[in-house]
């Protein structure tokens, strides 16, 4: 039981770090100003949603898309879609890792 919780915590931390790096890189590439506090809050919240079983990664992508477009005033295409799509792929892999561990 405790090893499963530790696995979930490690997957969350690694997923948040990879998603944060991806979002920061895409924002920097397209010249979107993204304050670090906003980045940490949005990525942390969406990573938590993204690790929910089955459709969590899709829910995390939708929330990231909404938060980035509303808070940062970024363009929907290609900036926000690349941010949400890349993060969604990271969360899908992380979520599958958790599901494999639980089964």
Image: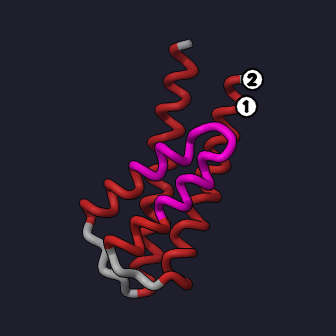
Q: In the rendered image of this protein, does residue 52 appear above or below residue 4? A: below
**Residue 14 x/y as whole percent:** 49, 45
57 in the magenta segment: yes
Q: Hey, which quadrant is residue 71 in on the image?
A: bottom left
Q: Nearer the viewer, residue 21 or 71?
A: 71
The rendered magenta stretch, by its main secondary structure, is classed as helix
Q: In the rendered image of this protein, does residue 15 appear above or below residue 63? A: above
Q: Which residue is mark 2?
A: 103
Residue at disc 1, secondary structure: helix
**Residue 93 x/y as whole percent:** 67, 48
Q: In the rendered image of this protein, does residue 101 appear above or below residue 82? A: above
Q: Nearer the viewer, residue 60 or 24?
A: 60
Q: Residue at x 49, y 40 (%)?
A: 12
8 in the magenta segment: no
Q: CA distance from mark 1 to mark 2?
A: 5 Å
Q: Residue at x 56, y 12 (%)?
A: 1
Q: Residues within 10 Å of mark 1 (few under 14, many from 20)?
A: few
Q: Nearer the viewer, residue 92 or 68?
A: 68
Q: Hey, which quadrant is residue 69 in on the image?
A: bottom left
Q: In the rendered image of this protein, does residue 24 appear above or below residue 90? A: below
**Residue 61 x/y as whole percent:** 55, 60
Q: Residue at x 37, y 87 (%)?
A: 31
Q: Residue at x 24, y 60 (%)?
A: 37
Query: The C terminus is located in which quarter?
Result: top right
Residue at disc 2, secondary structure: loop
Q: Coloured how?
A: secondary structure
Magenta stretch bounds:
45-64
* Residue found farthest to the top: 1
**Residue 43 x/y as whole percent:** 41, 56
Q: Which residue is mark 1?
A: 100
The reply to whether the C-beta atoms of the residues labelled 1 and 2 are less than 8 Å apart is yes
């Amino acid at each position: 039981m405790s090893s499963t919780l530790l696995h979930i915590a490690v997957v969350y931390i690694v997923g948040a770090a990879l998603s944060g790096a991806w979002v920061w890189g895409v924002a920097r590439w397209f010249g979107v100003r993204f304050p670090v506090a906003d980045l940490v809050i949005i990525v942390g919240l969406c990573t938590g949603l993204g690790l929910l079983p089955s459709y969590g990664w899709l829910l995390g992508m939708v929330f990231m898309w909404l938060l980035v477009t509303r808070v940062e005033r970024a363009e929907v295409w290609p900036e926000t879609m690349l941010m949400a799509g890349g993060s969604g792929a990271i969360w899908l892999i992380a979520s599958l890792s958790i599901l494999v561990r639980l089964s």
